[in-house]
Image: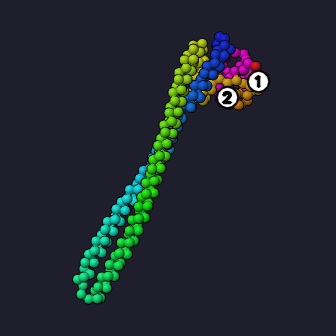
Amino acid sequence: MSTPNLKMQLVTLVQLQAIDSQIYALNEEKKVKPQEIEDLKAAFEAEKEQLNRLEKVSLDLQKEKKDRELELASKEENIKKLQTQLYQLKTNKEYNTMMQEIQNTKADASVVEDKILELMEKIDKAKNDIDEEKKKLQQEEQVFNAQKKEVEDRIKEIDDRLAQLESGRKQVTPDIDKKILAQYERILHNRDGLAIVGVKNNTCMGCNMFVPAQVINLIQMYERIITCDVCNRILIIPDE
Ligand SMILES: [Zn+2]
């Protein structure tokens, strides 16, 4: 059974396709937006992680410094104790041995002192690194928030535009035969948002495959919907 005024139906389908192509493109764009926000967030979180690492380094250094200070205090305590004992000794030999022990302990203490000074320098440097990282993080946070807002604004823009297109769609669809519309929508869904295409130079503009002359004749008879044998899209002959 032929559809009355099929040519007009096809013209309306082409109008609908123009709307649906925009809807498809916008939905495709919208689909990747949540991941964009996730990626931005991940980059920012990595920066925060860097600050945590630096703070951990600083804490470790401070703990090591404290340990060394305790070690130094204990050595100094020991030196004092040995020095008091020194005067209770009876022989020269005992005295010399004790003097040697005091010298050795002093030398050890001096090494620990150097280590503490070295740690203090490292702690200062760590503090600078942390301050710089904090500043950097503050800037990164501003950039992150701005970029996130940009993406969110774009999503809102897309949603607004989609609402407009949907209402434009509703104005066009009542003019299309229900069966033809159902076929069109099925193809639209299965073929990446493109359901109706032109034939140019014996080629389907949907899949670029050859369209035989007898198929072109069938299209031009406007008796029924003709689809591409390869991609199954509805074929039309565009006006010259
Ligand atoms: Zn095709």
> Any atom of ligand 1 within 8 Å of the CB at mark 1?
no
Q: Amino acid at mark 1?
A: Ala
Q: Amino acid at mark 2?
A: Gly
Q: Which residues are magenta?
A: 211-239
Q: Is residue 42 above or below residue 108?
A: above
Residue at 70 percent of width and 27 percent of height: 204
Q: Position of residue 23 (x, y in %)?
A: 57, 25
Q: Which mark is residue 213?
A: 1
Residue that badge 2 annotates: 206
Residue at 41 percent of width and 53 percent of height: 55
Q: Residue lying farthest front? A: 87
Q: Secondary structure at mark 1?
A: helix
Is 215 a magenta residue?
Answer: yes
Q: Nearer the viewer, residue 148 or 34?
A: 148
Report the quarter where the N terminus lies: top right
Q: CA distance from mark 2 to mark 1?
A: 17 Å
Is 210 a magenta residue?
Answer: no
Q: Nearer the viewer, residue 207 or 119?
A: 119
Which quadrant would residue 71 be assigned to in this image?
Answer: bottom left
Q: Position of residue 230 (x, y in %)?
A: 67, 30
Q: Position of residue 122 (x, y in %)?
A: 44, 60
Q: Is residue 187 visible?
A: no
Residue at 41 percent of width and 62 percent of height: 119
Q: Is residue 118 visible?
A: yes
Which quadrant would residue 191 be assigned to in this image?
Answer: top right
> Any atom of ligand 1 within 8 Å of the CB at mark 2?
yes
Q: Residues within 10 Å of mark 1 (few under 14, many from 20)?
A: few
Q: Residues within 10 Å of mark 2 (few under 14, many from 20)?
A: many
Q: Secondary structure at mark 2?
A: loop
Q: Position of residue 165 (x, y in %)?
A: 56, 21
Q: Nearer the viewer, residue 145 or 129?
A: 129
